[in-house]
Image (spheres, rainbow, N blue to C red):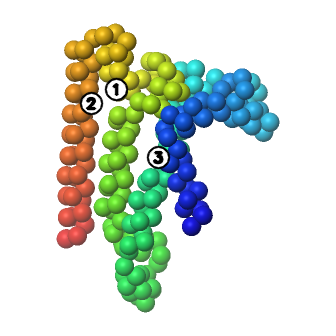
Amino acid sequence: MIVRAAVLIPWAIPTIVSAQMWAWMLNDQFGIINHLLMVVGIIDNPIAWTASATYSMWAVIMVDVWKTIPFVALLVLAALQMLPKDCYEAAEVDGIHPVRVFFKVTLPLITPALMVAVIFRLLDALRVFDVIYVLTSNSTSTMSMSAYARQKLVEFQDVGYGSAASTLLFLIIALATVAYLYLGRKQIQVGGD
């Protein structure tokens, strides 16, 4: 119970707060990440994680994954807790290897939950703005479609391009979701036959 609560902490922290926390930890002058890596001997000089075009995308991905993995873990845990025990008892009686049980029983049964998790993560990843904006501000090396639309609308006062970018982002998200649901349903039907 304590582990479940601890796993959910990154997801419960507001995104702006967690992004700012990571921005401080990744700071090249006083960040704890550089300090730890230098103490261990992995790096010799501090790295500007969020200012460098080489490392900034990796920093954004790491922070976004840290923030959203608990949600995916929660969905998978819920699916695993709902699995019927009789399938596993039958597999044990038949002497089926646990790896085969995982691929033939467990994975097909939790596929719908995994599909929901992937759809939510895909939607979040396509529309991410706040983590990128806090960590790297207006850096072109990490600019997402949402950041581009905001830049056009707010900074450049170009309503046409900003609206077009927002609409295109919506269409991409909608098409990706429909395609993923269609392919997932097709896969489930093929697997069930």
Whether label 3 touches label 2, CB < 8 Å: no
What is the spatial separation of the Cα atoms under label 2 and label 1, in whole angstroms?
7 Å
Q: Name the residue under label 1.
A: 145
Residue 42 has which mark? none
**Which class describes the residues within 10 Å of circle 3: few (<14), some (14-19), or many (20+)?**
some
Left or right of 101 in this view: 41: right
Residue 68 — which label? 3
- Is residue 188 rendered to the left or right of residue 69? left
| In this rendering, position of residue 51 left or right of residue 141 | right
Q: What element carries label 2?
A: helix
75 vs 25: above or below:
below
Q: What residue type is labelled 3?
A: Thr
In this view, the residue in front, 66 or 3, is: 3
Asked if residue 91 shows in the view, the reply is no
First in residue order: circle 3 vs circle 1: 3
Residue 34 lies in what quarter of the image? top right
* Amino acid type, callout 1: Met
The answer to whether residue 129 is above or below residue 3 is above
Residue 169 has which mark? 2
Residue 140 at what x, y percent from top left? Answer: 44, 18
Q: Which residue type carries mark 2?
A: Leu
Is disc 3 placed on a helix, strand or loop? helix
Q: Position of residue 8 (x, y in %)?
A: 52, 54
Q: Indicate which disc, 2 or 1, sits on the residue closer to the N terminus.
A: 1
How far apart are the two marked residues, 3 and 1, measured between alpha carbons? 19 Å
44 sits to left or right of 23: right
> In percent of the image, x 23 and y 70: which residue is there?
192
For label 2, count other residues whose C-alpha is less than 10 Å away and answer few (under 14), some (14-19) or many (20+). some
Percent coordinates x, y for residue 173 in the rendering: 26, 38
Q: How crowded is mark 1: few (under 14 residues within 10 Å), some or many (20 or more)?
A: some
Kindly indicate whether the residue at mark 1 contacts the one at mark 2 (C-beta within 8 angstroms). yes
The residue located at (32%, 21%) in the rendering is 149
